[in-house]
Amino acid sequence: MARFTAEEKFNMIMRYLEGNESYEEIGRELKVSKSVIQGWVRLYEHQGAEAFCQPYTTYTQQFKLDVLSYMNEMGTSSLETAAIFNISSSGMIRNWRKAFEIGGIDALQPKKKGRPSMKKETKSDVKKTSPVEGSIEALRAENERLRMENTYFKKVERFSSRTGKITNKIKAQVIFELKAEFDVVELVKVADIPRSTYYYWEKRLQCEDKYVKVKEAIEAIYHEHKGRYGYRRIAKELKKRNIFHDPKTINRLMNEMGIKCEVRMKKYRSYRGKVGKIAPNLLNRDFHAEKMNEKWVTDVTEFHLFGEKRYLSPILDLCNGEIIAYKVMSRPIYQLVGDMLEEAIGSLNSRSKVILHSDQGWQYQMKKYQKKLEKHNIRQSMSRKGNCLDNAVIENFFGLLKSELLYLQTFENMEHFERELHEYIEYYNHKRMKAKLKDLSPVEYRTQVLEAS
């Protein structure tokens, strides 16, 4: 291709930009390829006419690496990248990329001008030949190769255990940690990634992570809530600490950190047929309550651990979802429900008019249970037979309890489990935020919102 002056290039650019001629028409007349003229037009649009007046430039190794990294990260073509970085030829960038993929970062080193030195080659300069098969040197080399592979795969397994997958970033991170001990070229072969990919990630691994403090806060909140919070709740908790980020950003950071919400039940069935009086369904799935001690729900659930069973009977206030009373026992006897009811009644005053809703369990059909309700002006309500949706709120609480405690932790014995169960209910009432309560816990909502109204 003939060489053109800056003025000639500028004239071609103007002919195209005036809109009367295409790239092909100008190229045919002046015997220039379409892509070359396109490159000049892009260069002019990004850099102006001065881009064609600069003298010959020697590009540094770092500059070339920056250009290739930009292409890799932004997905731009060599033509567009040349215009952005004021490089006269897009073919030059393609040559850099090819050299980088074959020879790594050393291949980007600018070549020295002038004739090469005629210095005599010494023995130390001669490339070492491969050791003879079966020799001590060959055995040592094989042993070192196996040690490198073993070390590499162990680290990869450790890095990927939290995320569940092996990414190029993880491979590059492992190579970066091992490059002081083993040859980078050999490590890249074991990792089965292009050298350009490794050097792309190496540069970013050396950069300061702008999310360091955010990640520390995420990890603190995650462990504070024992893995029960997902990215949405953690984002809301961060806002309370004056750290504002989009939930999608928090989700991405949690994925990078390899942490996620650990949450998602043989249900105890207390129904034994009709053993007493069945109450009407006064609640009728209306789970909204304007004030405390207006609507309560209750049920019994079972835990089976270490060959033993424990039964939990709580009462939940529908106004704020708070557990206002509960009892834990080793057998599902009437006392389990009776003692819980006595505790709940202690929170009432003479003017309270409460609906207490349950399923048709035998305990709730007993005369002494129903008489105690009448004595304290509590109206009884029961779900329809075999319809768990009529008592969905307490069922939802049991689901949370089991997924956030029973399935999330390991316990030493039944006594340990009971301690953790009491701690969880305390945590649920005082610390666990609920979206429907404006991201407050049940107790916070009761004290801050209800008392203020």
Image (cartoon, rainbow, N blue to C red):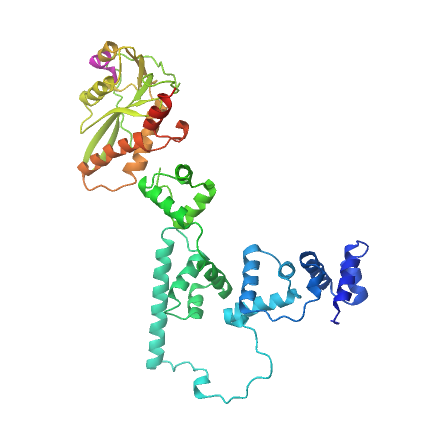
- Residue 134 visible in the picture: no
Question: Is residue 366 shown in magenta?
Answer: yes
**Nearest the camera: 138 or 156?**
156
Please identify the quarter of the rendering in which residue 274 is found.
Answer: top left
Q: Is residue 259 above or below residue 233?
A: below
Left or right for 98, reference 168: right
Q: x, y (%) of residue 64?
A: 56, 66
**Nearest the camera: 372 or 15?**
15
Q: x, y (%) of residue 291?
A: 36, 18
Q: Residue at x 24, y 17 (%)?
A: 345
Q: Is residue 378 above or below residue 93?
A: above
Left or right for 112, reference 12: left
Q: Residue at x 57, y 66 (%)?
A: 97
Q: Residue at x 21, y 35 (%)?
A: 419
Q: x, y (%) of residue 49?
A: 72, 61
- Residue 165 visible in the picture: yes
**Nearest the camera: 331 or 10?**
10
Question: Is residue 195 shown in magenta?
Answer: no
Q: Which residues are magenta?
A: 364-370
Q: Residue at x 64, y 58 (%)?
A: 80
Magenta region, mostly helix, strand or loop? helix
Please identify the quarter of the rendering in which residue 356 is found.
Answer: top left
